[in-house]
Amino acid sequence: MANVRDDETAPAGRGATTEPAGTSPDLLRLRGVDVTLGGTDVLSGLSLSVGAGEFVSVIGPSGCGKSTLLRVAAGLTAPTSGSVERATDNIGFVFQDPTLMPWRTVARNVRLLGELAGTERKRLRAEAAQAIETVGLAEFADRLPRELSGGMRMRASLARSLVLRPDLFLFDEPFGALDEITREQLNLVLMGLFRARSFGGLFVTHSVEEAVFLSTRVVVLSPRPGRLLADIPVTFGFPRALDLRYTPAFAALAGRVAGLLEGAL
């Protein structure tokens, strides 16, 4: 299938009042990236960019190299060929597992990355408190991870990454293990963070609805080795209310993305 760059616009739908943030400059640019691991071709000829104020979701069949793409973007895996350009070293990485230290309270978990970065203590405490407030955990700052629900642990993980104010966020299916209601709530939290801080985001998900709801663009990958099948703009305005998902325009766009996925299998 040929690569697709779709420039159609979609109506804003319910709950959308402003246009998405601007997308300049590029924070991340991959050019013709190939990745071979253990003799297996994982990514092939992949070119992709993420700009400031741009939220790009990546969707594709299982095993198509989505997580490898994030590792390449973060500099954790080197491409076999092609190039990776980063305009920033301030990158936040959020995993599906919150990876909280079980013996640390929420507040101390949130401060961890700042401590490792050598952030001045008074400033770090202020940044951590603000991040905890932002994700709605102020009342639970002194709780241990075992005292929190799965959704609350993920909120703490988001807050921890917020402390260093990343220019670029990489998300590896952060809400994939959560129930649907909690997932929707955290979609709204993440959208609020994106609107407030205008970072660049690269978000891996298996959910077509989640990809369309959160993003300014949706990238569709082929089965392994992952190739770019489509790069589709999502022009619903921000903020987006959950009932946007029940509009004909949303259903049409989600159906189009799903059709590309089904055609790739």
Image (cartoon, rainbow, N blue to C red):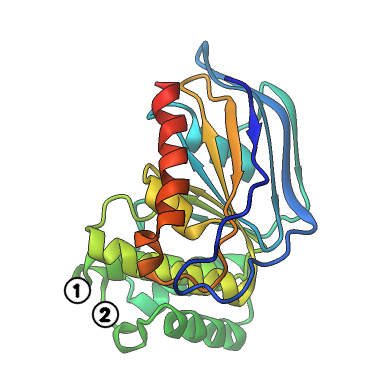
Quick one: SS at disc 1? helix
Tell me the number on the disc at residue 143. 2
Q: Which amino acid type corresponds to the residue marked 2 in the rendered image?
A: Arg
Task: Residue 204 in the image: state x and y as whole percent.
Answer: 47, 45
Quick one: 180 or 99, which is closer to the camera? 180
Quick one: 78 or 28, which is closer to the camera? 28
Snapshot quadrant of residue 152:
bottom left
Q: Quadrant of the C terminus?
A: top left
Task: Residue 243 in the image: state x and y as whole percent.
Answer: 35, 68
Q: Give the Cα distance between marks 2 and 1.
A: 6 Å
- Label 1 near label 2: C-beta < 8 Å? yes
Quick one: SS at disc 2? loop
Residue drawn at x 56%, y 36% as measured from the top left:
69
Q: As displayed, is residue 77 above or below residue 242? A: above
Q: Which amino acid type corresponds to the residue marked 1 in the rendered image?
A: Glu
214 relative to 207 in the view: left or right: right
Query: What residue occupies the far top of the structure in this picture?
Result: 39
46 relative to 185 in the view: left or right: right
Snapshot quadrant of residue 3:
top right
Residue drawn at x 41%, y 56% as measured from the top left:
248
Q: Which residue is mark 1?
A: 147
Q: As displayed, is residue 196 above or below residue 222? A: below
